[in-house]
Image (cartoon, grey):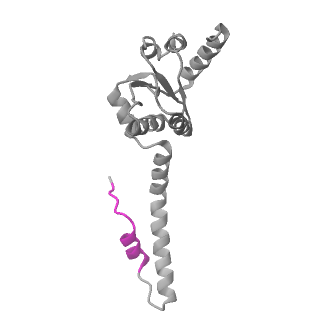
């Protein structure tokens, strides 16, 4: 049995998490094996999130007066709440992937930046690339013109070393660089 002080500490911690979180996802993890539960928590932590399992009444008390009050006030049955502090798609993706592996884990809804999300919205969010994947794509996009220029300059250097007459740089650059449209 939890003491009143312990319950108060849990409620305060949950309230702090609710206020700091960009995204909050309702799910179920009851019935997972210990190893599977630890792996899921690690995946959520890697996405800068947190998974909490506690009594529904404590969730309701912590959510009182917050944007999550509607979602967390009338919970029935076993529930878990995942908080996303930076990478909401990453946390949603971790929960969705766990749901594919384990039938027990299912997404039930969520909140993103104060907006209540349906199950379909949460699934669409989980399909988005994570923050790291998006940054990698952006970096590759920025590096493409530089890489093309480097390949052209290397080809010119090789042709000079081989004793061939160098092709005009403009012609080589148009062959290597992707076509762009001007508006």
Q: Which quadrant of the structure image shows residue 168?
A: bottom left
Q: Eyeballing the image, is 55 above or below 85?
A: above
Q: Eyeballing the image, is 130 above or below 153?
A: above
Q: Along the horizontal axis of the image, is 145 left or right of 4?
A: left
Q: Write the residue at 43% across / 37% down.
A: 98
Question: 9 or 131: which is nearer to us?
Answer: 9
Q: Is residue 176 magenta?
A: yes
Question: 107 or 183: which is nearer to us?
Answer: 107
Q: Eyeballing the image, is 44 above or below 77?
A: below
Q: Quadrant of the N terminus?
A: top right
- Residue 26 locus on image (x, y percent): 44, 24
Q: Write the residue at 49% across / 83% down.
A: 158
Question: 127 or 95: which is nearer to us?
Answer: 95
What segment is highlighted magenta in the picture? 168-182
Q: Is residue 58 magenta?
A: no
Q: Which quadrant of the structure image shows residue 103?
A: top left
Q: Eyeballing the image, is 75 above or below 25?
A: above
| Residue 159 visible somewhere in the drawing | yes
- Residue 165 locus on image (x, y percent): 44, 89
- Residue 74 locus on image (x, y percent): 42, 11
């Amino acid at each position: 049995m939890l003491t009143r002080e312990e319950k108060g500490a849990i409620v305060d911690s949950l309230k702090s998490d609710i206020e700091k979180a960009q995204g909050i996802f309702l799910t179920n993890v009851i019935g997972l094996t210990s190893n599977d539960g630890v792996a899921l928590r690690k995946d959520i932590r890697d996405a800068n999130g947190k998974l909490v399992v506690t009594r529904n009444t404590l969730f309701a008390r912590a959510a009182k007066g917050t944007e999550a009050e509607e979602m967390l006030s009338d919970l029935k049955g076993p529930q878990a709440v995942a908080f996303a502090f930076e990478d909401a798609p990453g946390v949603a993706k971790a929960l969705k992937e766990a749901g594919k592996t384990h039938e027990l884990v299912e997404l039930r809804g969520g909140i993103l930046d104060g907006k209540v999300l349906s199950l379909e919205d949460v699934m669409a969010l989980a399909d988005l690339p994570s923050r790291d994947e998006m940054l990698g794509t952006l970096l590759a996009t920025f590096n493409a013109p530089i890489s093309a220029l480097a390949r052209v300059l290397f080809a010119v250097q090789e042709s000079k070393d081989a004793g061939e007459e160098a092709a005009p740089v403009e012609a080589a650059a148009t062959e290597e660089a992707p076509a762009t449209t001007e508006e």
